[in-house]
Image: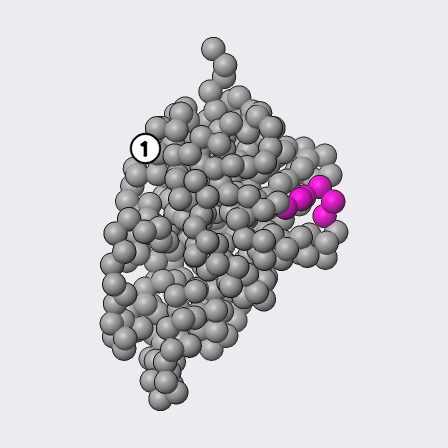
Amino acid sequence: MQPSPEAISVWRDSAPFWEKHRANIRQMFAPVTQALVEDGQIGVGHAVLDVATGPGEPALTIAALVGLQGKVRGVDPAMEMVEAARRAADRQGFRSVQFEVAGADRVPFQAETFDAVVSRFGAMFFPSPVDAVRDMLRVLKPGRKLSLAVWYSADRNPFFYAIQRVIERHVGPPPPEPGAPDAFRFAAPGVLRDILSEAGAMAPSERLLQFAIQAPIPVEEFWTLRHEMSEKLRGKVARMPGEQLAEVTRDVLEALRVYSTDRGMSFPSEVLIVSGTKSHPA
C-alpha cells in the first residue's frame, strides 16, 4: 500500500524546510542514528538501506561509516525529499550512496541485497507497517538485522510538548483522527515489536533510548526551525492573525527558554529502538 497523495504532498511541501535546516536536524538526531547503527550491526563495507530517508539522513551519515567498500541506498515516497538527498550527496562527494523514489512496502531492490535496513522516524507513517517490514526483511540478507526508531510517549518529549501546549492554549487541541499515522503512533511499548513479529522477523527486540536533542542555535532560531519542520505547525502559524501570532511567539519563546543553554537548545528525549533479524532459509 502506497502513501496517499495527501500524505506525500505533506512531505513534498516540507522538503525545502528539512533541506534548509539539514545541518541542525542531523545533529539533533545523531544519537538516534548511532543507535540504529549499533542495533543494525552496521560496519565498514556493508550494504545498507535507509527507508523513508527524507532529505538523506541517516543514509549519508551511514555512507561515511561503511566507506567506499560499502554502499547505501535511500528511498522516500516524496520526489522533493529524494532530490534534496541527491543534492546533499553530490555536495559531500559521496559516490557509494544513491536515492530512489519508493514507498516502504515496495522497495526497488532484489531479495537478500542488504546487510542492514534502517528507518529513523519513518515507521509511524507507513500506510501498512506489516507489509513494509515484510519487504524490508525480503531485501535483507539472512541473519542480518533491521532497526527502526520511533518516538516514545509524547509527555516524555518536550521537543514536541513544549510548543504544542502553548499552541493548544491559543487555538485549542487538534480534532482526533482515529488510526491516523502520526509521530506517536507506536509510542506504546511492544506495539511495533509485535508488528515485526507478525511480519516474520526473528527475535524482535525493543529498547528505550534516552538522549538529548541538541541544536547549537538560540531560542528564536529554534522556534523557526521547529515550526518550519512541521506541516501542522506551519499551517497553524500561517493562519494566525498578526496579533495572535505575536502573542503565541512570545509564549513559545518563554516555554523554550527552559531548554536553552550556553551551547544552544537541549531537550531530554526518549525514543524506542525496535529491531529484528531475518531468518535463515530452512
Dot 1 alpha-carbon crowd within 10 angstroms: few under 14, some 14 to 19, many 20 or more:
some
Q: In which quarter of the image is residue 70?
A: top right
For label 1, the SS is helix
Single out the residue that lies furthest toward the front: 5
Q: Position of residue 169 (x, y in %)?
A: 25, 75
Tell me the amino acid under the disc marked 1. Answer: Asp
Single out the residue that lies furthest toward the bottom: 243
Q: In this view, does 182 lie above or below 277?
A: below
Colour option used: one colour
Residue at x-position 27% and y-position 77%: 170
Q: Name the residue under label 1.
A: 194
Q: Position of residue 92 (x, y in %)?
A: 71, 54
Residue at x-position 63% and y-position 46%: 99
**Is residue 18 shown in magenta?**
no
Task: Give the magenta part as a residue range.
Answer: 94-99
Q: In this view, does 267 lie to the left or right of 101?
A: left
Q: Where is residue 264 in the image (x, y as percent from the top left)?
A: 49, 69
Residue 69 appears anywhere in the view: yes
* Image quarter hosting the N terminus: top left
Residue at x-position 39% and y-position 87%: 242
Q: In this view, does 267 lie to the left or right of 114?
A: left
Residue at x-position 72% and y-position 54%: 90
Q: In this view, does 205 lie above or below 15?
A: above
The foreground one among 192 and 178 is 178
Total marks shown come to 1
Q: Position of residue 14 (x, y in %)?
A: 51, 63
Residue 250 appears anywhere in the view: no
